[in-house]
Amino acid sequence: MATPSADLTTVLAEDIRPGVRLLTMNRPERLNAMDHQLVSELHDRFDEVAADPDLRCVILTGAGRGFCAGLDLKGSAAVPGTEELGRPQRGLATQQHIATLIPHLRSLKVPVIAAVNGPAAGGGFALALGADVRVCATSARFNVAFVRIGLSGCDIGVSWMLPRLIGAGRAFELLLTGRIFDAQEADDLGLVTKVVEDGAVVDAALEIADNVVANSPFGVWMTKEVMWSQLEIPSLQAGIDLENRTQILSSFTEDSTEAIQAFLGKRPPEFQNR
């Protein structure tokens, strides 16, 4: 397993299990609000994950009492190299730098579990939605936020992801009002899979990660790709066609043979990602 860079200070990385990496947004004094450095380091950490063939799952959380409070309105700045551009050009470059975090997150071959340990607003809410699984602490609070500061509630992929995760009717109310909702409502909406006591959210995410790692790397990768693609496929038959081809492709891996042999032999499989 590759060693994460120690030079990045606003997003910490720690391999807490074989194949499981914990990424921690580390601006606790600002509730891990997004400035240029944090956004850049998230991109860098995602690149590290993508380049590490031994990783099997990622947990994303925040340091201190917050997950991520969204854009740091006091500390954000234009993307370096755009200072001489016009205002719309600078703004669009900054917007794209932040918004591309979500497709970057989604493109990872391994699942990402958001361990939401406190407020997740605006861009932080988008990061939670962009993860494959979400668990949260009782202190977690969520809101769209953008509409509360004179902007559209539709930003950083939230207006695409939220209706698909909880249904359009409920999503539209949250997008239009920007109201804050708590962990219990997030659970009731089906936004999170588990609510745990404060201080236990990473452990709860780790339980899920352990169950993910028990499966073959290629099977998990293909599952992540197909499950997200199914949100965009226009028909049942097109979705089934994609599933059919993915199953046949997966059946040709050495790990698929190992999984069957382990099942028949009543032993744990030993996957090699081959």
Image: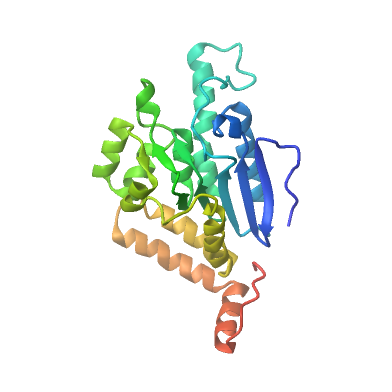
Q: Compare residues 21 and 74 and report the one nearer the observer.
A: 74
Residue at the limit of the structure toward the left, as seen here: 169
Residue at the limit of the structure toward the bottom, as seen here: 265
Quarter of the image with the C terminus is bottom right
Q: State whether residue 104 is above or below residue 132.
A: above
Q: Position of residue 269 (x, y in %)?
A: 62, 77
Q: Which residue is painted at 46% across and 38% down in the image?
A: 119
Q: Using the rendered image of the protein, determine whether residue 46 is visible from the camera's viewpoint.
A: no
Q: Position of residue 199 (x, y in %)?
A: 55, 51
Q: Using the rendered image of the protein, determine whether residue 238 is visible from the camera's viewpoint.
A: yes
Q: Position of residue 80 (x, y in %)?
A: 64, 21
Q: Compare residues 234 and 179 and report the one nearer the observer.
A: 179
Q: Which residue is painted at 50% across and 12% down in the image?
A: 87
Q: State whether residue 164 is above or below residue 155.
A: below
Q: Compare residues 215 and 109 and report the one nearer the observer.
A: 215
Q: Which residue is painted at 35% across and 49% down in the image?
A: 184
Q: Which residue is painted at 53% across and 38% down in the image?
A: 101
Colour mapping used in the image? rainbow
Q: Position of residue 216 (x, y in %)?
A: 58, 69
Quarter of the image with the N terminus is bottom right
